[in-house]
Image (cartoon, grey):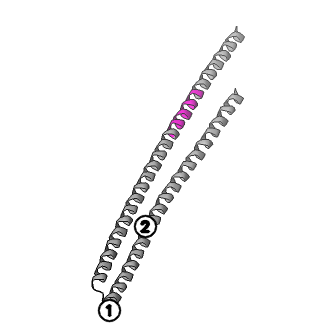
Amino acid sequence: MMMEIVMMMVIVMMMMMMIMMMMMMMMMMMMMMMMMMMMMMMMTMMIMMMMMMMMMMMMMMMMMMMMMMMMMMMMMMMMMMMMMIMMMMMTMTMMMMMMMMMMMMMMMMMMMMMMMMMMMMMMMMMTMMTMMVMMMMMMMMMMMMINLQISINGTLALHFFIV
């Protein structure tokens, strides 16, 4: 009789253990699922951000180009005007002066162009830096996730071993 009771107890214990194990498994699975979901969300967000950045960059570039074009046009117009005036007053001294002015104009234009280029470069650099940082963050997240998964798997194996 005693033996039977003991056996019963053992069976019950086993059952309980099994149930507990199942619960644990469920929990682990749930956790993993949640993590995955989070990862997906993060990824999507990152991609969106990148897209936005790209768009912004494009817009900036376009604007810059437009500005440059406008500047060029203006300069050309000025040149034309100068030429016309020169033609009209064909005196030597005047011509010299005009030439000087033209040179100045050219110089200024060059300077402007240079400035624009520099600005563009700076913008590009900034965007690139941000992207790099984002990538780094993503990598870190990935690593963390992988480590977590490995640890979970390890714990599961341990449980099985004990049982």
SS assignment at label 2 = helix
Of 53 and 146, the residue lying toward us: 53
Q: Residue at x 48, y 40 (%)?
A: 41
Quarter-of-image position of residue 117 = bottom left
Q: In this view, does 65 lie above or below 114?
A: above
Name the mark on residue 93.
1
Q: In this view, does 75 lie above or below 3?
A: below
**Alpha carbon separation for disc pair 1 and 2:** 39 Å
Q: Is residue 2 above or below residue 154?
A: above
Sort mark 2 into few (<14), some (14-19) or many (20+) by Cα contacts within 10 Å: few
Of 134 and 126, the residue lying toward us: 126
SS assignment at label 1 = helix
Q: Where is residue 62 in the image (x, y as percent from the top left)?
A: 40, 58
Q: Position of residue 160 (x, y in %)?
A: 69, 28
Q: Give the range drawn in magenta.
A: 25-38
Question: Which quadrant would the C terminus be assigned to in this image?
Answer: top right
Count up the numbered dots: 2
Q: Residue at x 66, y 12 (%)?
A: 8
Closer to viewer: mark 1 or mark 2: 1
As drawn, the residue found furthest toward the top would be 1
Q: What residue type is labelled 2?
A: Met
Q: In this view, does 133 lie to the left or right of 113?
A: right
Quarter-of-image position of residue 80 = bottom left
Name the mark on residue 119.
2
Q: What residue type is labelled 1?
A: Thr
Q: In this view, does 70 lie to the left or right of 54?
A: left
Is residue 122 rendered magenta in the image? no
Of 126 and 17, the residue lying toward us: 126
Quarter-of-image position of residue 142 = top right
Q: Residue at x 69, y 32 (%)?
A: 157
Q: Where is residue 125 in the image (x, y as percent from the top left)?
A: 49, 62
